[in-house]
């Protein structure tokens, strides 16, 4: 939920919001900034869950002379459970759909290196954490200058990348990488993305969509909660403290 303006009384604003689900799951709100409050359950939504979100803000005193303008309602249904688990120790991605393993894919993630450019340290390690698929591109033009690495450097690039699924705001994608097939399942050689063989990448691109989960374990850094849809990377006890009602 994003308010047009920051409500001076966050507790009053939060009290106007309700989330009901069938089947019921324990969940809670967390303020990510002055205007934005997110809701998530303690554990992943169950497949097929029907959710209703109500914002009964009309006429409510939100503090400082601010009143709610319009009520809002959102209804949605959770799709199948799709989780791709990437293990740095094995360089394999294990894909489960509705709890059943359906495919294992050899991968190559970010190399265990960093480079300093104009005093800024750029790490290529793929952070461990829980990612959520955000966008999909049949072809995505990727340029290392977008995160501070000039294309003129040895590790710089400006390339059209096929079958790219965005996982983070910082530019981590899962994508086809025919150039690193020999390394996939063996070692990490990418700039941070999850490289897959072309046939597996096509299957992943066709199968995974917005909101589906990709987890990475075993690497030396951690995914920041604000890097993409990172709510799942906030521990539950800390999440509960992010409510204005605690």
Image: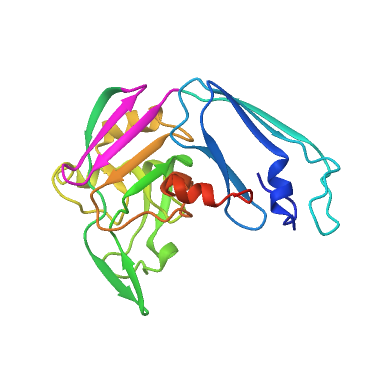
Q: In this view, does 154 lie to the left or right of 148?
A: left
Q: Please state the horizontal and vertical placement of residue 138, each as a whole percent of the image.
A: 43, 38
Q: Please state the horizontal and vertical placement of residue 227, each as a whole percent of the image.
A: 46, 54
- In the rendered view, tell whether residue 84 sits above or below residue 167: above
> Quick one: which residue is furthest to the bottom in this view?
119
- In the rendered view, tell whether residue 176 sits above or below residue 193: above
Q: In this view, does 26 lie to the left or right of 97?
A: right
Foreground: 123 or 55?
A: 55
State the predominant SS element of the stretch in magenta: strand
| Display coloring | rainbow
Q: Which residue is drawn at 25% across and 26% down?
A: 103
Q: Please state the horizontal and vertical placement of residue 54, each as a whole percent of the image.
A: 70, 33
Foreground: 155 or 160?
A: 155
Q: Please state the horizontal and vertical placement of residue 83, each as a whole percent of the image.
A: 35, 32
- In the rendered view, tell whether residue 87 sits above or below residue 47: below
Q: Which residue is drawn at 45% across and 45% down?
A: 236
Indicate the quadrant containing the N terminus: top left, top right, bottom left or bottom right: top right
Q: Which residue is drawn at 27% across and 35% down?
A: 198
In the rendered structure, which segment of residues is drawn in magenta? 80-99
> Quick one: which residue is furthest to the front in this view?
246
Q: In this view, does 186 lie to the left or right of 59?
A: left
- In the rendered view, tell whether residue 236 sits above or below residue 18: below
Does the segment drawn in magenta span residue 174? no
Q: How many labels does the image show?
A: 0
């Amino acid at each position: 939920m994003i308010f047009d303006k920051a409500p001076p009384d966050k507790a009053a604003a939060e009290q106007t919001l309700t989330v009901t689900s069938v089947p019921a799951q324990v969940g809670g709100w967390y303020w990510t900034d002055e205007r934005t409050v997110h809701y998530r359950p303690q554990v992943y939504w169950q497949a097929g869950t029907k959710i209703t979100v109500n914002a009964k803000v009309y006429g409510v005193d939100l503090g400082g002379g601010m009143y709610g303008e319009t009520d809002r309602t959102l209804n949605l249904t959770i799709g199948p459970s799709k989780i791709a688990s990437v293990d740095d120790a094995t360089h394999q991605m294990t894909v489960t759909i509705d709890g059943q393993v359906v495919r294992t894919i050899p991968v190559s993630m970010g190399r265990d290196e960093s480079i300093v450019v104009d005093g800024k340290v750029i790490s290529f390690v793929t952070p461990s954490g829980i990612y959520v698929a955000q966008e999909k591109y049949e072809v995505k033009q990727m340029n290392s200058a977008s995160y501070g690495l000039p294309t003129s450097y040895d590790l710089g690039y400006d390339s059209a990348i096929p079958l790219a699924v965005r996982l983070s705001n910082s530019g981590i994608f899962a994508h086809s990488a025919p150039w690193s097939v020999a390394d996939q399942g063996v070692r990490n050689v990418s700039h941070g993305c999850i490289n897959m063989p072309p046939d597996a990448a096509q299957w992943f691109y066709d199968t995974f969509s917005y909101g589906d989960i990709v987890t990475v374990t075993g690497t030396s850094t951690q995914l920041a909660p604000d890097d993409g849809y990172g709510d799942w990377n906030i521990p539950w006890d800390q999440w509960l403290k992010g409510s204005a009602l605690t």
